Image (cartoon, rainbow, N blue to C red):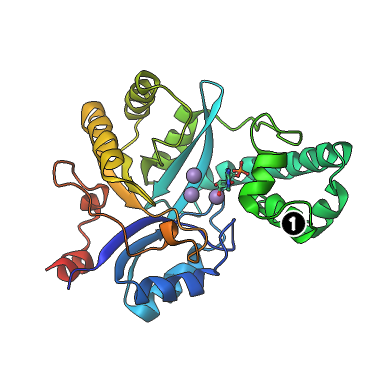
Amino acid sequence: MSRGVDLHLHSTCSDGVLSPTALVELLAASAVGVFALTDHDTVAGQAEAAAAAVRHGLTCLTGIELSARWRGGTVHVVGLGIDPSSPGIRAAVALRRDLRQARVRSIAERLDRAGAPGGEVLARLATEETPTRTHVARALVELGAAADIPAAFHRWLGRGKPAHVAAEWPELDATVADIVGAGGAAVLAHPLRYTLSAGQRRTLAAGFRAAGGAALEVVTGGSAAHQIETALGLALRAGLEGSVGSDCHDPSLPWHRPGRLAKLPEAVVPVWKRWELATLRSLEA
Ligand code: AMP
Ligand code: MN
Ligand code: MN
Ligand code: MN
């Protein structure tokens, strides 16, 4: 039986609900053979994921999902095969941790002004190294200020809502350079999820390639067939390779469940080819 590839996953080290170890147990039970843990702006879970992968006989690539700015908006870049202890990654992580900690304080102030329990949210996130809006959303749900996470974004945290705070992430080109400098391959994450026109999306993909980007996420969690076709066309046109990742945060949400992703279309070179993964070949044989 062939085992799958999933190169975009979250753990409790960012805004996922499973520890790296529990995530790897789920992957092993879900016929995933090759994976990367790609938490937002942190590599804190890498060692634990690698150790669990060894125990379960899975192939683990190092990974991260870096927040970046392109034309004033936010885009996400997955870095695969990076050296997590390289100076470039350390600096990229430290910068974003500081931005995130400042942003969460600013979000809390806005929540308080809007009549939501911002101070209590902040107290609950005090020990969080790399707080995301998902953490804020979960705290709001626990405090009874929203019914569920999507509702917390809809009411408080999303763009145009009372506690929305735009983050000044480092630029896309610099973000790609940090990943390449750390020996990794940069992948433009979930390319159809940004609020961009088709033309802007093509410009983004071309600019990403020109900056040294390697691949585009052609298959992501919940992708419909026509979306895979669109993303494939975008990758081929820009001369980018293809990647596959569920972006799983919570396996109880069915569209997120790893091990159920469509295969990468054969028309595009898989980004993981470069690592000549012996294990991958034997798993796919
Ligand atoms: P941040 O990087 O702190 O801005 O947080 C972004 C994260 O929030 C994303 O990675 C998603 O996991 C989550 N997120 C963003 N928008 C929504 C939404 N509308 N509903 C649920 N989760 C969301
Ligand atoms: Mn997230
Ligand atoms: Mn993302
Ligand atoms: Mn993600």
Q: Quadrant of residue 231?
A: top left
Q: Dot 1, how many residues are within 10 Å of its Cα: few (below 14), some (14-19), or many (20+)?
A: many
Q: With respect to residue 198, does 278 lie above or below?
A: below
The residue drawn where x is 48% and y is 30% is 172
Q: Give the residue furthest to the bottom.
A: 55
Label 1 sits on residue: 139
Ligand 1 within 8 Å of disc 1? The answer is no
Q: With respect to residue 97, does 85 lie above or below?
A: below
Q: Quadrant of residue 254?
A: bottom left
Q: How far from the left and from the top, in percent, is residue 80?
A: 38, 50
Q: With respect to residue 71, does 77 lie above or below?
A: below
| Residue 182 appears anywhere in the view | no
Q: Where does the N terminus fall, quadrant-wise?
A: bottom left
Q: How far from the left and from the top, in percent, is residue 243?
A: 30, 47
Task: Determine whether, in the image, residue 112 is placed left or right of residue 61.
Answer: right
- Report the number of discs: 1
Q: How far from the left and from the top, in percent, is residue 164?
A: 71, 34
The residue drawn where x is 18% and y is 46% is 265
| Residue 87 appears anywhere in the view | yes
Front residue of 127 and 160? 160
Q: Where does the C terminus fall, quadrant-wise?
A: bottom left
Q: How far from the left and from the top, in percent, is residue 281?
A: 16, 65
The residue drawn where x is 84% and y is 47% is 118
The residue drawn where x is 39% and y is 81% is 55
Q: Give the residue furthest to the front.
A: 147
Please name the amino acid that badge 1 sits on. Answer: Ala
Secondary structure of the residue carrying numbered label 1: helix
Task: Determine whether, in the image, residue 208 is placed left or right of residue 171.
Answer: left
